[in-house]
Image: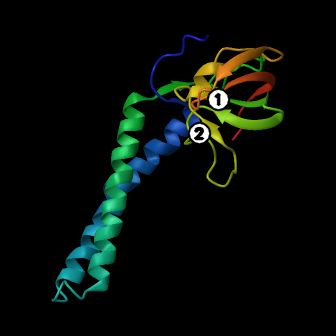
Amino acid sequence: MSSQPTGSWLTQDAYDRLTAELAELEGPRRTEIAERIAAARDEGDLKENGGYHAAREEQGKNEARIAELTHLLKNAVVGETPKDDGVVEPGMVVKISMAGKERTFLLGNREIADDGEDLEVFSTESPLGSAINGTKVGESIDYEAPNGRSLKIEIISAKPYRA
């Protein structure tokens, strides 16, 4: 098994992108929402004020995303894109054969992948991610699924993720 540091592994690009998003949410976005709430409040009766309630809901979502990003970035392990050496580690797109089916996914954090990309993501803390982290292409392992079933997993390929 690999001795990866704890925390979510992010590429430098992902870390920079998320830091910029956090700055936008904490600054201009937070101010804009507060101004919309104040303007809606000035309209009078808040019970029937759809604009006020929508702005408050948006404020809640914004604050939740700020909290999520703050936690993620505080605990992130920032690293370069891994080497193309066939070792399964964070930042790799992995293809496995499990229970007669092939699956392809990114090992790491969902924030690494582009939003438009339909790529499944498993963290190294997930049962599957922790089981295969550190294995090599061509290896097979016995994996105990969360439901208690024992499955054989074969590592077919492991390539660095390219955004």
The image's colour scheme reads rainbow
- Say which element carries label 2: loop
| Residue 121: image location, x then y, percent | 63, 39
Res. 87 in view: no
Q: Compared to 146, does 119 lie above or below?
A: below
* Category of crowding for the residue at label 1, using alpha-carbon neighbours closer than 10 angstroms: few (below 14), some (14–19), many (at least 20): many
Quarter of the figure that contains the N terminus: top right
Res. 110 in view: yes
Residue found at x 37% / y 32%:
74
Which residue position holds label 1?
Answer: 91
Q: Quadrant of residue 138?
A: top right
Residue found at x 50% / y 39%:
16
Which residue position holds label 2?
Answer: 112
Q: Compared to 52, does 99 lie above or below?
A: above
The amino acid type, in three-letter code, at marker 1 is Gly
Quick check: 98 left or right of 91? right
Q: Nearer the viewer, residue 53 or 38?
A: 53
The amino acid type, in three-letter code, at marker 2 is Ile
Callout 1–callout 2 Cβ contact below 8 Å = yes
